[in-house]
Image (cartoon, rainbow, N blue to C red):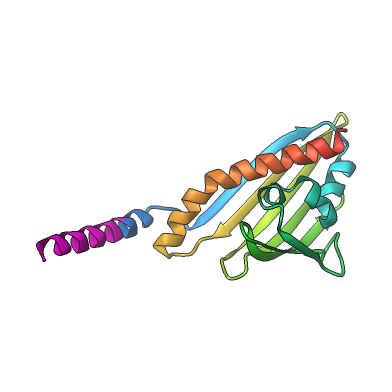
């Protein structure tokens, strides 16, 4: 029985430690990446504003090639919709909430009961090149596990955003 008590106390200690650490972690997870793409803002914006283009450069589609994608009645601009369902990527949908041609775009993402978030895009053309900033933020709540997951996910999400920006560049710079 002594060994079992030690295991229980150890598990309780780990849970308590996670709760204490989470008190100091941010509630919001925010990631932002910027790239300069050798193309006009109109071409770069068109890649993002039309959901049917995302299959060509989305890092999540590359990670989960068997992902099933369903498009809404509208696929671009405000109220454009994109649904996904995949073994690795889970299930969810994205809607364009704001679309300002060649300037900015905002999206809402719902991860099918696993949370939600907001995406934002900014496009600034200078000398025929476009500086693109892709941001994502999500409220992880006060749940200690959610806050810890936010910290863990931040690094891989940052890499995903970089990969997506590189994919867009490959599409428009050819």
In the image, what residue occupies the spot 72% across and 59% down? Answer: 107
Q: Answer left or right for 22 relative to 13.
A: right
Q: Residue at x 71, y 56 (%)?
A: 66
**Dividing the image into 4 quarters, which one contains the C terminus?**
top right
* Residue at position x 46%, y 61% in the image: 146
Q: Nearer the viewer, residue 119 or 111?
A: 111
For the N terminus, the quadrant is bottom left
Quarter of the image where one finds residue 156: top right
Residue 171 relative to residue 30: left or right: right
In this rendered view, identify the residue nearer to me: 68 or 114.
68
Magenta run includes residue 5: yes
Residue 6 point in image, percent of width and height: 16, 59
Q: Is residue 30 left or right of residue 97?
A: left
Q: x, y (%) of residue 53?
A: 84, 51
Residue 126 against residue 66 in the figure, above or below: above
Q: Position of residue 55 (x, y in %)?
A: 79, 51
* Depth order, front residue of 147/169: 169
**Which region shows up in magenta?**
1-17
Residue drawn at 33 percent across, 60 percent down: 19
Q: Quarter of the image holding residue 81?
A: bottom right
- Furthest residue toward top: 127
- Counting every numbered tag in the picture gives 0
Indicate yes or no whether the magenta region holds residue 113. Answer: no
The picture places residue 38, in percent across and down from the top left corner, at: 83, 31
Q: Main secondary structure of the magenta part?
A: helix
Q: Is residue 108 above or below residue 130?
A: below
Viewer-proximal residue among 164 and 106: 164
Seen in the picture, residue 101 relative to 69 is either above or below; the reply is above
């Amino acid at each position: 029985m002594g060994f079992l008590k030690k295991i229980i106390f150890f598990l309780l200690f780990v849970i308590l430690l996670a709760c204490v650490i989470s008190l100091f972690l941010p509630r919001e997870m925010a990631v932002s990446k910027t790239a300069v793409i050798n193309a006009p803002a109109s071409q770069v914006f068109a890649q993002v504003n039309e959901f049917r283009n995302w299959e060509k450069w989305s890092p999540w589609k590359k990670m989960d090639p068997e992902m099933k994608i369903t498009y809404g009645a509208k696929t671009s601009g405000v109220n454009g919709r994109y649904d996904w369902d995949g073994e690795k990527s889970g299930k969810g949908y994205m809607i364009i909430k704001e679309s300002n041609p060649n300037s900015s775009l905002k999206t809402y993402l719902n991860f099918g009961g696993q949370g939600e978030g907001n995406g934002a895009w900014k496009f600034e053309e200078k000398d025929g090149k476009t500086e693109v900033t892709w941001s994502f933020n999500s409220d992880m709540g006060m749940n200690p596990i959610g806050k810890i997951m936010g910290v863990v996910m931040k690094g891989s999400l940052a890499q995903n955003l970089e990969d997506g920006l590189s994919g867009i560049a490959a599409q428009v710079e050819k």
